Image (tube, rainbow, N blue to C red):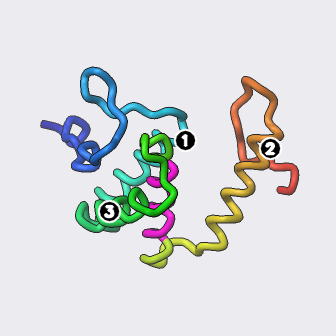
Amino acid sequence: MSQCETRSPLAQSPQLPRSADGEPVFPEPWAAEAFAMTVHLHERGLFTWSEWAEALSRELHKPGRAEDGSDYFDCWVAALSAMLVKLGVADADMIIDLQRSWQRAAEATPHGKPIELANDPLR
């Protein structure tokens, strides 16, 4: 089996939304990208599966989280961001600044056009 055919343990994450045939499904392209980034970082040895499961579980079980799992990928991104900060890969302020920049870019992008960071009017 090639590396491309090997399923990551991340694909078995509890509460991960799935299609009828059991494959992960993503509500938006950014969620798929966050998933892929996490798989890539895990496969590169930045963190173990156990470390990831603990970080994601902490986010999923915080008070105020949606009981129906509708904020699952928000939890996913929060867990990944927290891990990157904890491991010294990223700075928390840098992550927040990028999130705000992407939000402004999304708001400034005409409907139907790709959202690009260059669309942020403050960049």
* Cα distance in 3D space between marks 2 and 3: 32 Å
Q: Is residue 41 left or right of residue 13?
A: right
| Disc nearer the start of the sequence (1/3) | 1
Bounds of the magenta segment:
73-84
**In the image, residue 122 lies in the stretch drawn in magenta:** no
Q: Is residue 16 left or right of residue 50?
A: right
Tell me if residue 82 is in the magenta stretch: yes
Q: Quadrant of the C terminus?
A: bottom right
The residue tagged 2 is: 119
**Residue located beneath label 1 in the image:** 30
- Location of residue 43 in the rendering, given as x and y in whole percent from the top left corner: 29, 56
Instruction: Give percent across and percent down for residue 94.
Output: 65, 69
Quadrant assignment, res 2: top left
Name the element at disc 3.
helix
Q: Residue at the location (55% across, 41% down)?
A: 30
Q: Are marks 2 and 1 in contact (CB under 8 Å)?
A: no
Mark nearer the N terminus (2 vs 3): 3
Label 2 close to label 3 by CB (< 8 Å) = no
Q: Amino acid at mark 1?
A: Trp
Quadrant containing the N terminus is top left
